[in-house]
Image (tube, helix red, strand yellow):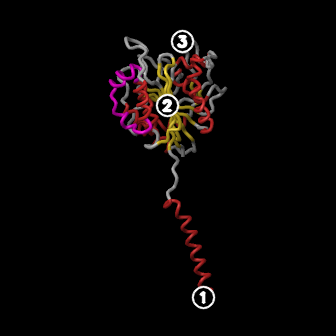
Amino acid sequence: MARIVAGVGSSHVPAIGAALDNGRTEEPYWKRVFSGFEKSKQWMANTKPDVAIVVYNDHASAFSVEMIPTFALGCAAEFPPADEGWGPRPVPVLKGHPALAAHIAQSVILDEFDLTVVNKMEVDHGLTVPMNLLFGTPREWPCQVIPLAVNVVMYPPPTGHRCYMLGKAIRKAVESYPEDLKVVIFGTGGLSHQISGPRAGLINSKWDKSFLDNLTKDPKKLTRIPHIDYMREAGAEGIEMVMWLIMRGALDDKVDEVYRFYTVPASNTAVGHIILENRRKTASKDKRAPAAKSRQAAARKAAQRIASKGR
């Protein structure tokens, strides 16, 4: 069966994509950011997922104020990079996994989450920047991708609790898919930032680091944070952080934090990143015992037979 092995949280700052595309990654300002993802790229290369489910928000590329789905699942065979006003980013077209995506849609909708199914969609920096940060700049992406776009732009966005429970429904769907696939799920966006208004430039590192702590240790605490707290503490765009809870809901209750990176700022945003792995389940003694016990029993019987012959 398919299984989710790990979750990745990553900011998706558009200026990071611009720095990549314009060859500025070695400049001191940007090197500080990109160096924080070197270990992550190695981790991803070692993990070798077959599929990445990437939770992100669209920035008026696939959708507009005329149509705003709360949750939109990409079920297409491919997803081209969107033109965000200065031409599409020079990144490979993402190859989808229509069969798994359709299976997730069916399972999740029957679990009473009302997804919008999207069979044609371009994807913007919200998805492509985290892909670059974790996979580098390959000629072709090394795994198939299923985009999940979440509305965190127009009020009302989904609650953190709703996102967390959707993650659990996605995990259930993935684990009921019969093909043997290794899946990594991304939660993207954030961390604290506000791009307009009197508080433009707001960054709250204390809030961000507490969020990352609880993402690992106490995600249910995060599900109780109301929208107004995100807005007040993390800025208007800080609400993007609810998308990380979809990723976290898709993982085990207890996870191993493999890596964390945080730096301020990139453009006007706090960059946050975390890798969480599901704990490898090792069989308990009792579960391993049947084969061992049968061998031990056979050995005892053989020893008894030998002993009886000796008598």
Mark 2 or mark 3: whose residue is earlier in sequence: 2
Residue 178, percent across and down? 54, 45
Q: Which amino acid is tagged 1?
A: Arg
Visible residue check, residue 193? yes
The answer to whether residue 108 is above or below residue 14 is: below
Mark 1 or mark 2: whose residue is earlier in sequence: 2
- Which one is closest to the eye, mark 3 or mark 1? 1
What number is the disc on residue 85? 3
Where, by quadrant of the figure, is residue 168 drawn? top left
At 48% from the left and 31% from the top, the residue drawn is: 187
Magenta region includes residue 231: yes
The reply to whether dot 3 and dot 1 touch (C-beta < 8 Å) is no
Q: CA distance from mark 1 to mark 2?
A: 70 Å
Element at badge 3? loop
Visible residue check, residue 74? no
Q: Main secondary structure of the magenta part?
A: helix
In the rendered structure, which segment of residues is drawn in magenta? 215-238
At 63% from the left and 25% from the top, the residue drawn is: 137
The reply to whether dot 1 and dot 2 touch (C-beta < 8 Å) is no
What number is the disc on residue 9? 2
Element at badge 2? strand
Name the residue that disc number 1 marks. 311
Residue 157, percent across and down? 37, 25
Magenta region includes residue 259: no
The answer to whether residue 220 is above or below residue 69 is: below
Q: Which amino acid is tagged 2?
A: Gly
